[in-house]
Structure formats: C-alpha cells, structure tokens
Image: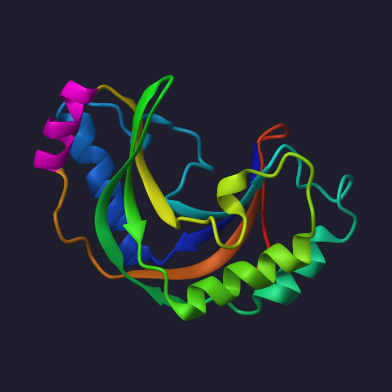
Amino acid sequence: MHSLELLLGEDAEVSVRADWDRLIEAGLPSSGRHRSPSNRPHITVVAAPSLTPETIPGIDERVAAAAGFVDLPLASAGVLLFGPGRGGYVVVRQVVTTPELLELHRRVCDAVGTVPGQARTSFPGAWTPHITLARRMRPDQVAVALDVLEPHPAPLRAVSLRRWDSDARTVVRLA
C-alpha cells in the first residue's frame, strides 16, 4: 500500500522509538525491527494501492496545498489493539481525534479524491488515527507488551506530511 503520512516532531518520535525499543528488549514484535531509513513513527492519513503522480496527476501539489503548513498538537489516548487478523494483533498508540486533526484529514482526502482500492479505514468517518507500535502480535504477547509500554507517552505534535511509495520505496515530503 502507498500512503500519505503525518510525521511527528522530534520529542514525539523519540518517545515512540523508545516504545519500539522496549518491545524489542522484551523479545516482542516491534515496528523498530524494520531498519529501513524511511521507517519512522507516523500517522497514516490515506492508504491505497497507488498514490503516485502517474495514477493521480497533481497529487503532491494538491495535497500540499490542502494540508498547508503542518504543526498540530496531538495527544495519545493510550494503547489500542486492532485485530486479531490473520497475523495476530496490531498494537498501536491511539491518537485523540481533535476537530483540527479531523479537518486536516478531510482536506487531504478531498485533495486526493476517490482512489480505487483505498483502505476503508482511511475514509473520513471511518478513520482511527494511530501510531503503529507492533504487528503480528500473538495473544500471549499482548499482556507482556502492555506491561513494557510507557503508559503516558510524551505529548505528540504532527510537523509534516509525506507520501510513501511502497513500490519504489521512496518518500516525498509534501508539507
């Protein structure tokens, strides 16, 4: 999947990476195990099979204009579990939906338009903003994860928006 993602400020990124490290130290699945330079804590705004300028002409310019300058204070509502899916649970930090965050999401979705195959969970009204901490966690690992994760993370701040192309493995900074 390709995605449009909100990136976090330095303090928030350090806090999330510390959670990733705690999971690794406990021998658990962790998003921190992905060593790609493009792997950063983020909040996915839109996900679809393709979000490139070739499939959506002008996407970068339209999304950048719709997002404007991103500097948005956020808060975590704590740890949330998605699943279980085929691979197990996904452990995330839920992000509190504020009117400002929902407005940014709506503007970005409007700029993208209708995208074939867009993830239902990235549509306005169905979006659950979150930061992924780990995927493919077994039920017996969930309790351990909840034990090692920081209960009250540092305040969050979204500071930029990027487009991730999972096919080309490239990142384009948009706002």
Residue at left offset 71%, top offset 75%: 66
Q: Residue furthest front?
A: 125
Q: Is residue 27 visible?
A: no
In terms of depth relative to the viewer, which is nearer, 173 or 50? 50
Q: Is residue 159 left or right of residue 139?
A: right
Residue 128 picture quarter: bottom left
Q: Main secondary structure of the magenta part?
A: helix
Quadrant for the N terminus in the image: top right
In terms of depth relative to the viewer, which is nearer, 60 or 74? 74
| Percent of width and height locating residue 15 | 26, 56
Q: Is residue 48 left or right of residue 153?
A: right
The count of marks equals: 0
In terms of depth relative to the viewer, which is nearer, 106 or 45? 106
Residue at left offset 49%, top offset 70%: 159
Residue 94 picture quarter: bottom left
In terms of depth relative to the viewer, which is nearer, 2 or 143? 143
Q: Residue furthest left?
A: 147
Query: Is 145 within the magenta?
Result: yes
Quadrant for the C terminus in the image: bottom right
The stretch of residues the image draws in magenta is: 139-148
| Percent of width and height locating residue 167 | 71, 31
Q: Is residue 23 above or below residue 120?
A: above
Q: Is residue 127 left or right of residue 78?
A: right
Query: Is 15 within the magenta?
Result: no
| Percent of width and height locating residue 31 | 37, 36
| Percent of width and height locating residue 138 | 26, 22
Residue at left offset 15%, top offset 52%: 150
Color style of the picture? rainbow
Residue at left offset 46%, top offset 69%: 158
Q: Is residue 167 visible?
A: yes
Q: Is residue 74 above or below residue 57?
A: below
